[in-house]
Amino acid sequence: MKAVYIRSFGGPETLEVRDVPEPPPPSGTQVLVRVRAAGLNRADLLQRKGAYPPPQGHSANIPGLEFAGEVAAIGGGVTDYKIGDRVFGITAGEAQAEFLLTDARVLARIPDNLSFTEAGAVPEAFITAHDAVFTQGELQKGETLLVHAVGSGVGLAAVQMAKAFGAKVIGTSRTADKLERARQLGLDEAILAGEGAGFSAVLRSKNGGGVDVILDLVGGGYFRENLECLLPKGRLMLVGLTSGRTAEFDLSMALTKRLRIIGTVLRGRSLEEKAEATQKFANDILPLFASGKIVPNVDKIFPLTEIADAHRYLESNRNFGKVVLEI
C-alpha cells in the first residue's frame, strides 16, 4: 500500500510516498479501514522532525493522527460495523496510508452529508476540543470561553461547539483576517494578539472582569495572562505549546481564585480513554454535523503525492482551519 514515509528526521524534503506492507487482517474488535482522507496536524510536523515520537507499537516513519474512510474488513468480535460503512476516528499514528488497522471502539460513523475530505478534517480537532472544553473544562451554557489561536482547526471546532451549546466565545489570533473569518462561525469578540496592551487587559476591560474557561493552544507565553483573566473557579485547558514549554507565575493567583489548570493530550491515552472521548463526541456532536448546525473547517486539500508541500503550507501558519490529505 502507499503511505507517507519519513526517510529521516528533518525538513519537509525528508517526506516521500512509499510502498509499505499492508496491515495484517483484523481480529477480535479490530477493523481494517480503507483510508480516503487524513487530516494533517502540527503533531505530524513535530514527528517529522523527530520531536514527537508515537507511542510504542506505532511506526515513527508513518505519521497520521486522524482518518476518514470505509470499512474494508472486520474482526470476529465486531458487531457495530460492516464492510463498506463510512467511518472516521483518531489514532496514535500511521493514518496517512491507504489502509489502517484500528479498533472499532474508536470509530464513529460519518454523517451522510459529509464527504471523505470533509470528514477527514473532523476527528482530531473536534474530539480534542470537545474533550477539553466540555468533558474536562465543563463549559456551561451562559459561560464565556476564550480560545487562543482561534483560526486553528481545534480553535474553530471549539468556537462552533461552544456557540451551539449556548456559551459566549472570545478568540485571539495574530492575524486580523483569521479573526474576521472566525466571526462568521460564531465568534462573539476578537482580540488581535501582540498589539498594544496584553490580551488579558483588553479582555478584562471588555468582558466584565474575565472568562470562565480558556482553551490555550499557544502555551508558555500566554500562561501568566491566562491566570489574570480567569474568573474565580475558572478552568485553564492547556493543549498546545507553540510559544514555549515553560512559564513563571504567581501561585497565589491560582489559590485565591481557586483555579483549575489542566493539561491534556489525546495521542498518549489508553484505548479505553480514546474510546470514551470518541463516544461522547459522537453522541453530542455528530447530530449537529448531520443537521448542518456545525460544519467541518477545511482550509486546503492536498493529494498524498504533495505531502511535502502540505507540510510547508501548515508550517507557514497561513491555514484557517484544517489541511487535509486525499489518499
Image: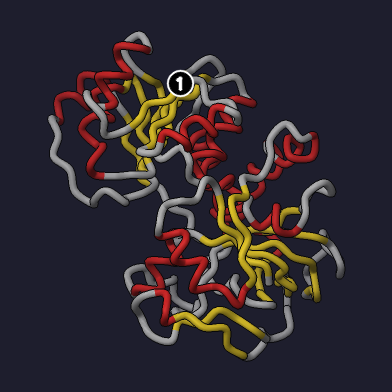
Q: Residue furthest front?
A: 177
Would residue 155 be visible to someone looking at this image? yes
Dot 1 corresponds to which residue? 189
Q: Is the N terminus in the top left, top right, bottom left or bottom right quadrant?
A: bottom right
The residue located at (43%, 71%) in the rendering is 54
* Horizontal side, residue 226 vs residue 139: left or right: left
Q: Position of residue 79 (x, y in %)?
A: 83, 63
- 153 with respect to 287 (left or right): left
Amino acid type of the residue tagged 1 in the rendering: Glu
In the rendered image, which quarter contains the C terminus? bottom right
Residue 61, placed above or below residue 127: below
Q: How is the image coloured?
A: secondary structure
Determine if residue 148 is in view.
no
Q: Which secondary structure lies at badge 1?
A: strand
Pick the front one: 188 or 247:
188
Q: Position of residue 152 (x, y in %)?
A: 48, 45
Looking at the image, residue 289 lies above or below residue 258: below
Q: Position of residue 46 (x, y in %)?
A: 37, 66
Kindly identify the residue that appears in the image at 74 percent across and 73 percent down: 34
Residue 5 is left or right of residue 198, and the answer is right
Q: Residue at x 54, y 33 (%)?
A: 181
Q: Residue at horizontal 15%, vertical 31%?
A: 251
